Amino acid sequence: MNNIKHIIFDVDGTMLDTSEGMISSVKYMINEMGYVMPDEMTLESFVGPRIQDSLVRVFGIEGEELNKAASVFRNRYKEGDVLLASPYDGLEDVLRHLKEKEYTLTIATNKRQDFVDALLDKFDLSKYFTKVYGTDMQGKYTKTDLIMKCLEFCDDINNNETVLIGDSRYDAIAAKEAGILFLGCLYGYDFKTIESIEQYNPIAVIDDITELISILC
């Protein structure tokens, strides 16, 4: 794997455990919209994907109702739930090692740009990343769009020298669509077994973020 030069990180379930704040805002939105509260497993499935995609998948809504529900969620989240998060143990040590090895580090996340900026500032992690791409205010950008932005910014590095590190099928599919490598995480919100990741042909699978040091350094 020593040909890798550019590492793109997902955030939710990969770098940070953001489940507490996300689920709190999802529950608030559900109550405000008058929806039936789903089970805990369904609530947890909101962590990671775009809020619009989760709302369509779980409640089957569209149009103005979809926009309103997404807006209720985002307004609640930005009021404070966004900061209810914590880095996975060893994250900063990993980022420091990767930076010392002169990897180019970027972020592509479905989290809104101002939300991810607030989290990186809270945990003093911005210094490790060359560029950070979150989604737009309307949530129009897909994960593939955001990965492509990272690739365009680092246009001196080839796609086959770039890997996305993520914890979900959405990450794996986006990496394939963008034509880059994928490395899967089992400690996040989606993938729970090696078998669940294998169909996406990852270059490696990790149970703990600190394993990146032995794999990439």
Image (spheres, helix red, strand yellow):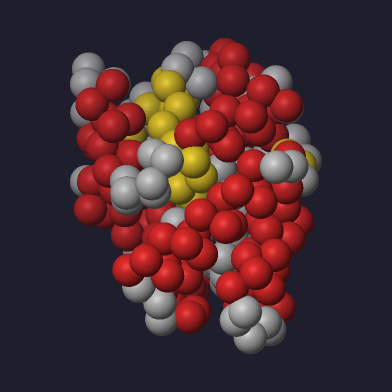
Q: Is residue 184 visible?
A: no
Residue 2 is situated, as x and y percent measured from the top left of the image, at 40, 29
Residue 129 is situated, as x and y percent measured from the top left of the image, at 51, 21
For residue 101, side relative to residue 180 (left or right): right
Q: Is residue 130 above or below residue 56?
A: above
Tally of numbered discs: 0
- Quarter-of-image position of residue 36: bottom right
Between residues 105 and 138, which one lies in front from this camera angle?
138
Tell me the quadrant of the picture where the N terminus can be found: top left
User: Which residue lies at the image location 62% right of the left edge and 79% below the top edge?
Assistant: 34
User: Which residue lies at the image location 33% right of the left edge and 34% below the top edge?
Assistant: 162
Q: Is residue 124 above or below residue 175?
A: above
For residue 151, side relative to residue 51 (left or right): left
User: Which residue lies at the image location 47% right of the left edge and 70% below the top edge?
Assistant: 55
Q: Is residue 41 above or below residue 194?
A: below
Tell me the quadrant of the picture where the C terminus can be found: top right
Q: Is residue 22 visible?
A: yes
Between residues 215 and 167, which one lies in front from this camera angle?
167
Between residues 101 and 110, which one lies in front from this camera angle?
110
Between residues 135 and 60, which one lies in front from this camera angle?
60
For residue 38, side relative to residue 152 (left or right): right
- Quarter-of-image position of residue 60: bottom left
Residue 88 is situated, as x and y percent measured from the top left of the image, at 73, 43
User: Which residue lies at the image location 49% right of the left edge and 79% below the top edge?
Assistant: 58
